[in-house]
Image (cartoon, rainbow, N blue to C red):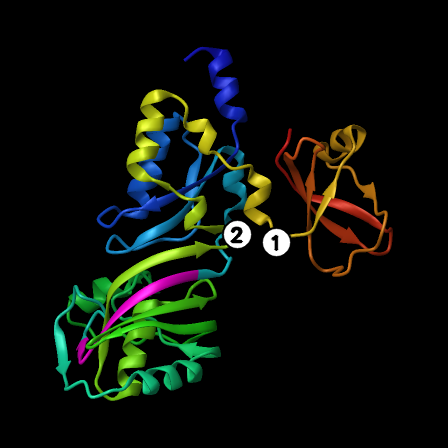
Amino acid sequence: MSEQDYDVKNAISGVLVVDKPVGLTSHDVVQIVRRGTGIRRAGHTGTLDPRASGVLVVLVGPAVRLSEYVSASDKRYQAIIRLGESTDTFDGDGEVTRRSAVEITEEEIHELLTQFEGTVEQVPPAYSAKKINGKKAYELAREGEEVELEAKEIDVYHLELLEWDPPEAIIDVFCSSGTYVRALANDLGDALGCGGHLVGLRRTKSGEFALRDAIQMRKLQDAFENGDWYKYLIPAAEALGDWPSRELTYEEVDLVRHGHRIPVEDPPANPDHWVRAVSQQGELVALMEYVAEEKEWQPRKVFFT
């Protein structure tokens, strides 16, 4: 690679939204992106299990520094739950621990789903990557040890029954980051009195990005071979599209990129919320914090150097 090629690749920054197929890990997808783009700085913003498909957001180049903010974004899924059977892993990979007759009406499911909406406490699955004394919970569980994980607070914004074909229910799940849909499937089954586990999962939305923004893996790999993958790269600023933004003049871009404050024209509606600083060309320059005492924007994370 020539020095010029290196400089070009080093300057590339943005988002690739991939429709991950079943069978690949999230890390597999990141490795494919690294090889295809020739850019080592790449990472996903939220693990999607190998058995699951759908929206996987991959940050490329300096945009990887947005990971902590994008990872915290809300998620949406279509979950297929099989009622009448519970498993130790809460999904189809585990051993069946309970079987019961499924004598449930569609109306009963609708009614129960509303009870699971809101801010709730959820206990992560024993077969998860949560750490216990430095060891992953699923490793302990596989060794036959009893795993006790603390409940954590999650937000379930909306649950909707899309299809009921006994014993399987397809449910639209709109929830906060960190929600275990497997655990939700298990809890729903328990509440219905017959047990249940997750047999299919497709992420339909992650933060600002939905399936309509995603490119299928085969198509992306073809674009890598053809050398035109850049057309699928989404500007980094759109990864935080729900954040307020401040457009910078050319002079302000130079100030912000060197860490200098700039004046606030109008006090923000939410003084505690950072803003995206973008150039007139739409490039993400920095994330800035409001300094009320001085009525200025302070750059906190600079991307355009």
124 sits left or right of 143 in the view: right
Name the residue located 20 percent from the left edge and 77 percent from the top edge: 166
Helix, strand or loop for disc 2: loop
Residue 46 position within the rendered picture, expressed as x and y whole percent measured from the top left: 41, 53
Query: Which residue does the numbered mark 2 point to in the structure image?
Result: 208
213 sits left or right of 36 in the view: right
Name the residue located 21 percent from the left edge and 69 percent from the top edge: 89
Q: CA distance from mark 1 to mark 2?
A: 7 Å
Which stretch appears magenta? 76-86
Assign the magenta stretch its main secondary structure: strand
**Residue 81 belongs to magenta span:** yes
Q: Amino acid at mark 2?
A: Glu
User: How many labels were placed on the picture?
Assistant: 2
Dot 1: few (<14), some (14–19), or many (≥20) neighbours within 10 Å? few
Name the residue located 18 percent from the left edge and 81 percent from the top edge: 84
299 sits left or right of 102 in the view: right
Query: Which residue does the numbered mark 1 point to in the structure image?
Result: 242
Dividing the picture into quarters, in which one does residue 247 lie? top right
Residue 289 position within the rendered picture, expressed as x and y whole percent measured from the top left: 72, 51
Name the residue located 25 percent from the left edge and 52 percent from the top edge: 50
The residue nearer to you, when weighing 148 against 174, is 174
Dividing the picture into quarters, in which one does residue 305 lie? top right
Residue 210 position within the rendered picture, expressed as x and y whole percent measured from the top left: 45, 51
300 sits left or right of 184 in the view: right
Q: Amino acid at mark 1?
A: Asp
Task: Tell me whether the residue at label 1 lies in contact with that at label 2, contact meaning CB atoms closer than 8 angstroms.
Answer: yes
Is 222 situated above or below 184?
above
The residue nearer to you, when weighing 248 against 106, is 106
Dot 2: few (<14), some (14–19), or many (≥20) neighbours within 10 Å? some
Helix, strand or loop for disc 1: loop
First in sequence: mark 1 vs mark 2 = 2
Q: Quadrant of the N terminus?
A: top left
